[in-house]
Amino acid sequence: MLRPLMIALTLTSAWLALTGPAFAQTTAFGGMRADVSAPVEVAADNLTVDQTDGSALFSGNVVIGQGEMRLSADEVTVDYAEGGQERIRSLTAIGNVTLVSGEDAAEAQQAVYDVAEGSVVLTGDVLLSQGGNVLSGDRMTVNLATGAAQVQGRVRSVLQPGTP
């Protein structure tokens, strides 16, 4: 999986360098997947629940897990689907956001996890690392079911050459 990723990133990076930063980069990040049907577990220093709008605010050392995926942040707002707190609609993480799944790790200033769509959108100084390979940009969208990711906005990458 890593060798095709490196080839795809190398070719895409070269193409982007020639055609400009306006285009987005799409590739598969094998480890950045999650079982979207698994329960979501949350741990934090504080919790504030707002019954009127169906939200909960976790703050201080927030860690959220779903299957093998872990998300940590300064604070996370949980928005529940209509009809009560049985189903989570989305999670919005703000401040020092880190998303880890397998060997893949991503950092950003903000992340929005849409549970129904099974996607995470990271924004603000996004940095993705997979082994020795690093990819950065302004925005990254990850499909957790397929592992496909799209990075936009001044995309840069550092690729480590493979060994034969």
Image (cartoon, grey):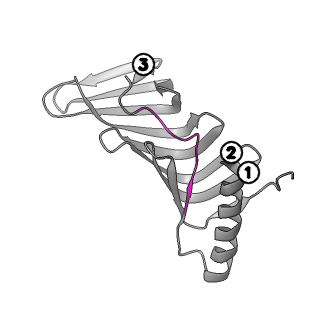
Residue drawn at the location 59% of the way across and 59% of the way down: 137
Q: Mark 1: few, some, or many residues within 10 Å (few <14, many ≥20)?
A: some
- The outermost residue toward the front is 164
Local SS, label 2: strand
Mark 2 is on which residue type? Gln
- The residue shown at (50%, 39%) is 33
Direction right: furthest residue: 164
Q: Main secondary structure of the magenta part?
A: loop
Mark 2 and mark 3 residues within 8 Å of each other at the beta carbon: no
Total label count?
3
In this rendering, the answer to whether 17 lies above or below 128 is below
Could you say where residue 9 lies in the image, as x and y percent from the top left? 66, 62
Q: Mark 2: give few (<14), some (14-19) or many (20+) Cα within 10 Å.
A: some
Q: Are marks 3 and 1 in contact (CB under 8 Å)?
A: no
**Residue under numbered circle 2:** 130
Q: CA distance from mark 1 to mark 2?
A: 5 Å
* Residue at image mark 1: 133
Residue 8, position in %: x, y?
65, 63
Q: Amino acid at mark 3?
A: Asn
The one of 26 and 75 positioned closer to us in this rendering: 26
Residue under pointer 3: 46
- Which segment is the magenta one? 26-35
Q: Position of residue 161 (x, y in %)?
A: 83, 56
Q: Position of residue 78 (x, y in %)?
A: 33, 32
